[in-house]
Image (cartoon, rainbow, N blue to C red):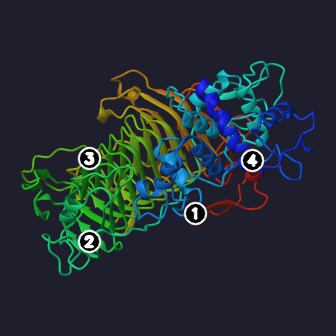
């Protein structure tokens, strides 16, 4: 820890002096001897580490924000020239921000954030922001301090654990830091510096155990909540602000040109051949009938951006109608010159740091957007319509974002391959497979023949929030074989229904045969048997996707909260062990699943069969279901077959018996459920019970 101690001393001098004027006092009028940090503040003052303010105060309870803290850490560890040159060297010229949308490139703190980001001192929040004005909490401060010091730690799925461990080992966490989320004060920092510099090991110190700070025996500390495994603040999609370097257009164009604005490329594929790291390819408005792929890659500091003049820049992948008759698809599947077999509207394999922004992809013989083995992919502000399979399909990737897109018409099928020997497994509106780090937010999704979105088969560290999902036949959001997933503030409705010929109908009425890529409406209607069961559940938490060989059979660390799920055919949420039901493999495992502050309404719209709002599989153990609203539901609202399910503090209205501890019965007084407004009026028991998606 010696290197960490040396760094901490330097950091403290910067931290506690930069935020004070250089005006020395023998003592501080606001730090009496009875103050819990009195000895520490006296020590760092006598060591010349701190000075007070001209008014004679030290202000031990003042906090520091993330921008200020980052500046101090970076100035302590990096050369002035590295700091001064970072924006020019590492931030794309067309960007108006430095890595994070809330860090303007011309902000005073941008150069420090730039150095911290490029040297892996900070990572930002999962929603893509940095939140410079927010107070820095202890867990965040521990990570920045330890990372910047060069002190080696062992990686851990819990992002802050190794950094807090490093300070805990030296008894350097004062009992005033009662939780990982506590905002660091000047008094806290003085105490930590004192313990590290003076090597004080006999003062009461918080211990880090079981993912929380624990006080020594007999010592009481203020009660504040611990921080979640990752921050969950909603993101806002980044607005487009690019300076194009290459153009595709319909006027005065030539694929043999340089791709200038006055003489653009004629085809998107020609433009994609020309782009390199740092380029921005602008697709001008017009209809481009082609299927394309990206051969080149961006870098972490120089992304490739493919953007459209507007949504009227349209890539039409060739299906003349949906379902797609393969014998009439425009264009060849095989591009001999490139040795590429193109089924999807846009595809890329092994390319990273790529942005697609602000144009339309439609009528896709397979996927709309296909991405394999990528890092840092961003899909935003797009319109993607009508695909034989997934609208967006991601495999084996890292750190992707799918933000603010309009996605309509997934898994609509094909009529005949007509001699083309291609076999694929049907998938979802958004498919995410074996991907580490993803955010799917602010998307508007509708009308698909299978699931809306499905992170599965080893995908982890995901956020799914602020999406509107309606009219998918099977499931709205399907979490399968995944870990560390948070699903929140989504609106999911009319699952189990589909708009055919302009009329919303039950999928079970439309489809009497199995959905797969070789079926059409007419072919399906002529078959018998159908699904064999009613379809249409808002959210599914499952293990055992049989199409992928059963995998590990584990779903772990999943939080589902503050969603509104309503008017579905047969249920709002289902926890399902597909492995056990398959009779092929052992029982699956569900660990640390929480379902809270959701509004579940009319979860059995068709009244065709009894359909509880929530079904808990008997393989589930310790699932927590609390502070939800269950309204207009089958009896029982919760069909619990699990072991040790904790059901508490839920509100029930026209939903059978009130189940669990602390249950409340009463009308939640929704504002206008017929129009989808599930806010509650004054006097609602939900307000007292803090139940439902509002809380």
Say which label, 3 or 1, has the lower sequence index: 3
Callout in the foreground (2, 4): 4
Check disc 1 and report the residue beneath it. 676
Q: Is residue 553 left or right of residue 337?
A: right
Q: Is residue 49 left or right of residue 302?
A: right
User: Where does residue 412 sit, x and y in percent of width and height?
Assistant: 28, 56
Callout in the foreground (4, 3): 4
Which of the labelled discs sits on residue 528, or is there none? 3
Q: Circle 1 sits in a helix, a strand or a loop, which is it?
A: loop
Determine the CA span between mark 3 and mark 1. 35 Å
Check disc 4 and report the residue beneath it. 63
Determine the CA span between mark 1 and mark 4. 41 Å
Callout in the foreground (3, 2): 2
Q: Nearer the viewer, residue 107 or 671?
A: 107
Measuring 66% from the left and 60% from the top, which residue is drawn there? 679
User: Where does residue 363 sit, x and y in percent of width and height?
Assistant: 25, 63
């Amino acid at each position: 820890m010696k290197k960490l101690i040396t760094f901490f001393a330097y950091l403290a001098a910067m931290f506690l002096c930069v935020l004070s004027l250089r005006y020395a006092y023998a003592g501080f009028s606001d730090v009496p001897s009875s103050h819990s940090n009195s000895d520490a503040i006296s020590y760092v003052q006598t060591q010349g580490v701190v000075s007070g303010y001209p008014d004679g105060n030290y202000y031990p309870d003042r906090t520091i924000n993330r921008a200020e803290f980052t500046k101090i850490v970076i100035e302590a560890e990096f050369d002035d020239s590295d700091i001064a040159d970072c924006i020019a060297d590492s931030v794309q010229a067309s960007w108006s921000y430095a890595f994070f949308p809330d860090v303007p490139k011309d902000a005073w703190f941008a150069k420090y954030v730039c150095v911290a980001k490029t040297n892996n001192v900070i990572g930002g929040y999962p929603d893509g922001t940095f939140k410079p004005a927010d107070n820095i909490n202890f867990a965040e401060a521990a990570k920045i301090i330890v990372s910047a010091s060069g002190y080696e730690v062992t990686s851990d799925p819990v992002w802050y654990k190794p950094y807090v461990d490093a300070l805990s080992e030296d008894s350097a966490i004062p009992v005033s830091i009662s939780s990982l989320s506590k905002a660091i004060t000047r008094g806290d920092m003085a105490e930590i510096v004192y313990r590290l510099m003076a090597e004080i090991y006999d003062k009461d110190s918080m211990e880090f155990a079981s993912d929380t700070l624990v006080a020594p025996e007999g010592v009481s500390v203020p009660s504040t909540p611990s921080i979640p495994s990752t921050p969950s603040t909603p993101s806002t999609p980044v607005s487009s602000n690019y300076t194009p370097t290459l153009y595709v257009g319909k006027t005065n164009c030539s694929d043999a040109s340089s791709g200038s604005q006055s003489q653009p490329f004629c085809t998107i594929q020609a433009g994609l051949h020309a782009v390199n790291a740092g380029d921005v390819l602008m697709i001008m408005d017009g209809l481009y009938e082609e299927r394309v792929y990206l051969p080149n890659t961006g870098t972490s500091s120089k992304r490739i951006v493919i953007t459209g003049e507007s949504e009227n820049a349209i890539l039409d992948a060739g299906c003349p109608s949906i379902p797609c008759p393969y014998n009439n698809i425009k264009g060849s599947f095989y591009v001999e010159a490139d040795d590429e077999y193109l089924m999807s509207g846009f595809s890329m394999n092994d390319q990273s740091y790529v942005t697609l922004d602000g144009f339309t992809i439609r009528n896709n013989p397979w996927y709309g957007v296909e991405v394999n083995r990528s890092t840092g992919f961003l899909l935003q502000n797009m319109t993607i319509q009508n695909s034989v399979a997934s609208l967006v399909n991601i495999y084996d990737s890292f750190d992707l974002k799918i933000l603010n897109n309009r996605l309509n018409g997934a898994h609509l099928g094909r009529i005949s391959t007509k001699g083309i020997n291609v076999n694929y497994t049907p998938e979802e509106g958004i498919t995410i497979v074996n991907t580490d780090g993803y955010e799917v937010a602010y998307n508007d999704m509708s009308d698909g023949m299978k699931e809306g979105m499905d992170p599965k088969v080893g995908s982890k560290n995901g956020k799914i929030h602020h999406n509107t999902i309606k009219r998918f036949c099977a499931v709205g959001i399907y979490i399968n074989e995944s870990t560390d997933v948070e699903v929140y503030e989504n609106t999911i409705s009319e699952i189990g229904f589909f708009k055919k010929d302009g009329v919303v109908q039950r999928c079970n009425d439309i489809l009497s045969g199995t959905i797969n890529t070789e079926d059409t409406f007419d072919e399906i209607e002529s078959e018998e048997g159908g699904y064999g069961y009613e379809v249409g559940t808002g959210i599914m938490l499952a293990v055992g996707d049989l199409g992928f060989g059963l995998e590990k059979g584990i779903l772990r660390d999943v939080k589902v909260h503050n969603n509104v799920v309503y008017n579905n055919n047969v249920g709002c949420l289902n926890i399902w062990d597909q492995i056990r039901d398959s009779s092929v493999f052992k029982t699956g495992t569900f660990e640390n699943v929480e379902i809270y502050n959701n509004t579940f309404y009319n979860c059995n719209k068709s009244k065709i069969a009894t359909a509880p709002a929530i079904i808990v599989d008997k393989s589930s153990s310790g699932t927590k279901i609390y502070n939800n609203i269950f309204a207009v539901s089958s009896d029982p609202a919760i069909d619990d077959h699990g072991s040790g399910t904790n059901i508490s503090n839920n509100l029930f209205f026209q939903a059978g018996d009130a189940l669990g501890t602390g249950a409340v019965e009463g009308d939640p007084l929704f504002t206008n459920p017929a129009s989808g407004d599930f806010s509650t009026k004054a006097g609602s028991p939900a307000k007292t019970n803090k139940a439902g998606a509002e809380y």
